């Protein structure tokens, strides 16, 4: 399973989110058609830009509940003090990708910032 974890500012547009996903996938050496899902914090439920990006890639959005996000936050590689203060996790993108891909997930691409969005890619042997 390949999951793109996304974090973004409230005013982020779908083009920034899509660009961040494409850049993180390219860094990870993964083609966009291999993407199984986009994950983000449950606090972003109904985010129009994230939903639009998911539609562009033809994948579902996985909303990660706060406890799962925080548990996965212990496995992140990067740390943003600002994000940690706002959300309680060092990187929403990395934690969301890891949580959604499952307990055996590993990061293929750490957090990458594009405009007002961030993306990380995680993979696991779990079925989508």
Image (tube, rainbow, N blue to C red):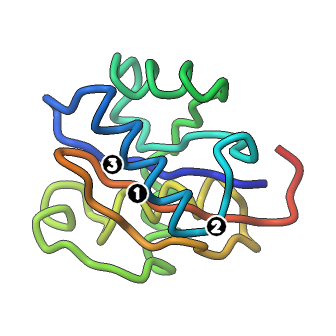
Instruction: Tell me residue 7's x, y (percent).
Output: 33, 48
Eyeballing the image, is 82 above or below 78? above
Which residue: 45% across, 43% down?
A: 40
Quarter of the image that includes the N terminus? bottom right
Residue with the mark numbered 2: 29
> In the rendered structure, which disc, 3 or 1, sits on the residue that comes first in sequence?
3
Eyeballing the image, is 23 above or below 74? above
Residue closest to the eye, 19 or 3: 19
Eyeballing the image, is 116 above or below 11? below
Quadrant for residue 44, please give it: top left
Query: Does 72 sit left or right of 17 as displayed?
Result: right
Which residue: 37% across, 43% down?
A: 19
Which residue: 20% across, 67% down?
A: 84
Mark 3 → mark 1, Cα distance in angstroms: 5 Å
> In the rendered structure, which disc, 2 or 3, sits on the residue that comes first in sequence?
3
Which residue: 62% across, 64% down?
A: 122
Residue with the mark numbered 3: 7
Q: Are marks 3 and 1 in contact (CB under 8 Å)?
A: yes
Residue with the mark numbered 1: 93
């Amino acid at each position: 399973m390949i999951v793109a974890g996304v974090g973004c500012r409230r005013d982020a547009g779908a083009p920034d989110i899509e660009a961040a996903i494409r850049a993180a996938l390219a860094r990870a050496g993964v083609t966009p058609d291999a993407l199984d899902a986009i994950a983000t914090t449950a606090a972003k439920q109904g985010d129009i830009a994230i939903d639009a990006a998911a539609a562009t890639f033809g994948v579902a959005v996985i909303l990660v509940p706060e406890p799962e996000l925080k548990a996965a936050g212990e496995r992140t590689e990067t740390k943003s003090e600002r994000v940690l203060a706002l959300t309680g996790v060092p990187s929403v993108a990395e934690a969301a990708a890891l949580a959604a891909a499952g307990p055996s997930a590993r990061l293929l691409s750490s957090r990458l910032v594009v405009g007002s969005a961030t993306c990380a890619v995680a993979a696991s042997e779990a079925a989508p």
